[in-house]
Each structure stands twice: as structure tokens, then as C-alpha cells.
Amino acid sequence: MIDKFIKLITSLKLTVVCLLCSLVVVFFGTMAQDPLGLYISQERFFHSFFIDWAAMWASVKKTLQMFGVYMTPSTGAQVLQAQWVPVFPGGYLLGSVLLINLIATHFTKFKWTKAKSGIFLTHAGIILLLVGQLFTDMFAKESNLRLEEGQTKNYSIDARKNELAVVKIGENSNRVISIPESKLKVGKVISHPEMPFQLKVTEYWKSSDISGSDAPGYMKVDATQGIGPRVYVKSIPAATAMDARDIPAVVVEVLDSGHGHGTWFSTPSLARRQFHHDHDGNQWEIAFRFKRYYTPYSITLLEAKHDKYKGTEIPRNFSSVVRIEDSVSGENRETKIFMNNPLRYAGKTYYQYQMAAGEMMASRGLKSTSTLQVVQNPSWLAPYLGCGIVGLGLVIQFLIHLVKFAKKRKPA
Amino acid sequence: MKPVIQQFCLVFAVVLGGCGGKIEVYDAPPDLAPPAPAPPSASAPAMPTPEMTWKDLPAGWEEVGGQTGMRFASFAITGDGGKAELAVFPFPGPPNQMGGEKRLVNMWRDQLGLAPVTDQEFEKSSQKIEAGGVEGTMFDINSGEESSGDRIVAAVVWAKGFTWFLKMSGDSALVAAQKPAFVSFLKGLTFGFKMPESMPSPQSGSREGGDRPNWKTPPHWEDLGAGMMQIAKYRASGEGGETEISVSRLGGAAGGIPANVNRWLGQVGKPSVTNADANALAKPIEVPAGSAKNVELSGDSKDMQVIMVSQGDSTWFFKSFGAKAAVEREKAAFVEFVKSVEYN
């Protein structure tokens, strides 16, 4: 039985099947980006063990359009609401099987010889590529840093994730207990050893819109404290556009020493309206907000510039002049961030991302703002190294064969 | 061999299982205070602000909230069919700067949970309307049945340097019932803009142009003073209608010929052309000051003639834009006028 299993996972047929399936996944995953948007496509095709029927059908419909067969395109909301029925292996499954197949084959079938050193190197490069991608998926963080001119921040916010932040206010630093959104389920009581009280989730909306009046479709929030009694909320379809994100909302009840201390409404769009709870002389602030990544340094936006070609509305350049101040390293300098010229600092890369500057802001008496995209990817070198090693392996293998061939052709 | 594979699978499972869903605890510095509002800067460009006034509000309409953020005005609409609201947003620049009307319609459709629009449906959902004396486009987007769900009726109007969005949304039955009132409300609007006090009045010159050079104009041209971004403006009236002649000056090549030609094509209601075709439309013309280009564009209802003269580090634009017959009638006088300019 075990021998059969080992034979299966080390077979060349499995490799070929996985590679063919990968081609299919890449093709349909790419086609799906038109109706579903980048993030849903990534999640359903590449960051999953199986592709579900609804996502695959959305992609097939888009593909058929190329051949003149038009069917009403699926929307991201339809795919998210559809029942999950797996129909095809996803990126994680194919990548994992390929990785296991490659490694297992090396241990069972391959024997190191000088003549095969190129093949070994090529395979090592492919393994590095697969593992590197896995680590990128797991550890890479993408966040945004939005600054008004003159504003200083020491944190960026995640582009997709939200957190229920329970913050113990200190004199010089705050203690943050970050509860991920995935823990917010209606009826669930959340506790933590560092939190002297509990939070009970009484209502939760994954994607919401709020209003100050009972406009059509909006329902009154069942919260007794803070802004809650004055807010109306509506559940809306999940955002699918590249530049949009879901704004969730939650109502939590604070349970302290077994007693309820009122219910509170919180949403990232009102994150500054955090609510407070005092316990044993300590002040706590609680807010449902975009997930934050703090840095030991701060960045100040000195100037945001949106240049256009004169006489036209055609953008010429977006640039941000920022000051970076790091009390640990003593770094204190100005730098300019613009397209293809990001700031790289402390393992993070800051790219120019969005801008609201110039006439539109000036005409409204608003300050110019600039948003920087912050990318942190500890395994960013893996694809470069992997491709380099694969290339080197192929060259070595080719040279080995070439030398062998040339020797054979030599006249006796 | 087996233990190696088992160990690998175990590590892989642990690594995958370990990602996400965990409560994190860490120390963070206190939030930094937001910056104080900036005092008005003398160097900041003084821009006109949009203005819109309306006649009497239809029955059941009430202005609420006033000017907040990007919103110029809001109206609450109540009636038998439920509730609705009208929100008014002005943005500087023409509608194509906002990504085009189809993109806007798709944005509104998305708000109603509808799939993006096809070209046919887009044509069907739009109609030309009159708003404040200018032509605009109105879109009617219904989420479902006539009597249920949400509906958006919105108008996009390009007037006085701003694109105005007037979006009536709410209960389908009420929005449908209020559509005639919305159309008549649009007709009664007056669009304008207000100059900041620090900005010189339009008559005192242009932001980029400086003083008028010496030139000779035909006696029948009526001097309208200077406009926004314009050194001078004239009106030529006569048989066949009138045309407006304007003069402006911009630095460098002012974006180049293709970008400008395509912008003008848009103004006469024609589609954009390739860079090569745009360059071909700009024909050389002799003027005493040096090299110049002459562009003549014909639209459905209006024509345009533009002469671009490169002078030092700037480009002068002389533009005649008006009724087809008027532009043709004034052509010779217009060219003579451009030739008469004595640049400083």
C-alpha cells in the first residue's frame, strides 16, 4: 500500500498532469479577473485547494465570449454567495503535489552524478520557486499609507484585512490586542488572557453601508451605547473592484465580571469613534478598524504633487516628498517617491499609489493627500534566485551534453 | 524514505495551518495627532469654486445638510412611494476626466447590485436633457421591477468648467414618480462659479497669459474681455450665426498637438483619432512670427478653427468656435487677426 502510494507520488505522469492542470488554472484564473476582479480570482483559483463551480463558470463564460458566445457575466457577489462545489484542483493543491512529487522523486529515483548536476540544479530552482511563492502568500503584507500634507504616521493599514482592536492606553505606549475579523461570529464570546473583560458579538455585517437616517434598505442598529442608537446600517454585496474594499460593521457587548456593560456599534468607516471601557483604573479603547501595521519609525508627507502636461488634463507625474524619522537608527532624511522610484526602508517598499492633489482639492479648500502602497515580502528574493538557479542548471546540463557530443564526434 | 516524506507533509501542514485567524498582541506607540488645518497659502493656486442655484423646489423635496465634503447639496424627497434623496456633486473638468459616462453608469449599476452595462443597454438607459440652459445626459437605472427595489435617475452636466452629477436614488416607485419633477428641476438650474477673493477678476488678465500684445481686430468683433485661462475673447455675429474667438497662451508645447486636437474633436462631438491622424489634421500656415499650425474641425452642429503659434517658450492658441456658417464666414478675418499679432 505504502509502496503504491510512493510510486504514485513519484510518477512522471503525476508531474505532467499537475503541469497541465496548472496551465488550465492559470488560464481560467486570468480570464476570471475580468468579471470577478483580482482578489476574488486569486482567492478562488490560486489561493485555494479546489476551484469551486461558480468561479469556474464565471471564467468559462468570459472565455466563451472570445468565441462569440455571449452569456450574462457572473458578478463577484453571485460567486461569493453561491454554494461551494469543488470542480477542479486549485493552485495550492497543484503546487503542493508538484512540490511533494519533485522532492519525493529525488529521494527515491534520482542518484547524484556529475552528469546530472544540471538537472539537480534546475529542480532545486523549481523547488525554490514553489516554496518562495508559498512563503509570499503566507508572509507578504500589502498595506496602504495615506497621508495629508503635513501629517505624520507610524503605521500603515492593510489593503484587505480588518481587526477589532482592543487597546489598553498607556503613558508612553499602548498595548494592542488585535482580534482578526474571522473571529467575529454572531453569538461568539471573545476572551484573551490580557483582556480583563470579554466581548460578545451580537451583530456582524461583512460588507455594509451606514446612514444617519432610515433611508430605504437601512435598518436600525441594535446598540445602546455611543453612536450606535443613531446609526442605520445596510448589508451590501461584497466589493469586487480592484480599488474597493468591503466595509464591515459589528455590534459587541462588553461583559465585565459577568455583567453586561452595554452594546456598541463599530465600523472601520467610523474607526475614530472608538468606544471606551474602564477597568480597574485602566482605560481601554475598542474599535473595529482596518488592520494596522505599526513601524518603529514615522513618515511625514511634506508635499504631494500632481503634475499635468500644460494645457491638458493628461497626468505627467505623481510624486510625494516625505521625511522619514527613525529614533532607533537615527535616520532622519527627506526623499521623493514617484513612479518607478519607491522608497525602500527597513524591509518595506513604499510605492506611489494614489493621489488627490492639485486643482480638485484646492477648489474645495482641502489638503492634498497621497497614498503610498507599502509592500513587505520577506521572500521577495526567492523568484529571482529560483529563476537564476533554473537557468544555470539548464546551461550546465546543456554544456555537459555538448561536451559529450563533441567528444564523440572527434575522429579516432 | 518514508519518514522524510512524512516529515515534509507534517511541516507543510503546520505551516499552512499556522497562517491567519490568531489574536495578536503587541505594543504600539500612541497615535500621532492629525495635522492642523493649513492656513491659506499665498502660493497655492486660487481656484474657482462651483456655484449652482435653483428655482422653487418640487413638492415633497427638502434641502438637507447643505454643503459637506465633496457634496454640494442634498435634498430629501418624500412621497407615497417611500423615500429618496438627491445628491449633487460638482467636479472640476469635463466628464471624460471621470472615466466617461459608461463607467459612471456601471458604478451606479454596481450600487444597485446590477452587472455592468452592455453598449446597447447603455444607449437605452441614457437620454439627452436640458439642465440650466446646457445639454446634459440623464440615466435611468432600475434594480428590478418598476414597483419594487431601488432606482437611480442621474444627470451628468458639463457647465462652467465643472462636471455636475445630480443623482436621485431611493425607492423605485418614488424615484419613477419624481422623474418629471427632476427633469423640470434640472431645467430651472443656474450653473456658475465663484472666484476666490484673492484671485484677480477675469477681466484683469489671464493666469498664464500676461498682457495682451498689439493686434488688429475686425470692427464687427465684439470684445468680451478676458476669460478663465484666456487673454482675450471676441464674438463675431452676422448672417449664419455667431462664433467666439479666444486667445490663450500656455507654456512649452502645451501637451502636444495630438492631445490638443483630440480634446477639440471631443468639443465638436467627434471621436478621438490616432496621434498620426491628429498630427495630419494640423496643417502648417504662414504667420509673420514664425511657425504655426492650423486645425479646422467640423462637428455636427458647430465648427472650430484653431491656429497654434509657437513663440519663445510658449504656445499661443487662437480659436474660433461657433456655428458652422459663422466659422466659415470669419475664416479670412480670423487668419488676418492672427497674422496681425505683435508678440512682446
Image: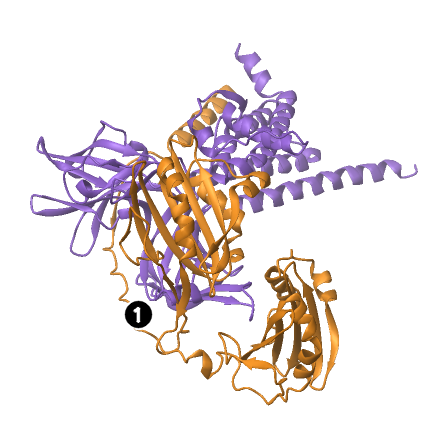
Chain colours: A purple, B orange
Q: Can residue A348 be seen? A: no
Foreground: A237 or A56? A237
Residue B80 is drawn in which quadrant? top left
Q: Is residue A28 above or below residue B122?
A: above
Q: Which residue is mark 1?
A: B38
Residue found at x 7% / y 43%: A280
Q: For residue A97, what is the image quadrant?
A: top right
In x, y percent, where is residue A378? 45, 46
Other-residue count near label 1 (Cα within 10 Å), few / some / many at <14 / 14–19 / ≥20: few
Quick check: A141 above or below B218?
A: above
Question: Eyeballing the image, is A411 above or below B49?
Answer: above
| Residue lying at 40% horizontally and 68% vertically, measured from the top left | B193
Residue occupying the far top of the picture: A1
| Whole-percent x, y for residue A395 in the image | 71, 43
Pick whichever, A257 or B325, lies toward us.
B325
Q: Position of residue A315 (x, y in %)?
A: 53, 63
Above/below status of B228 relative to B183: below
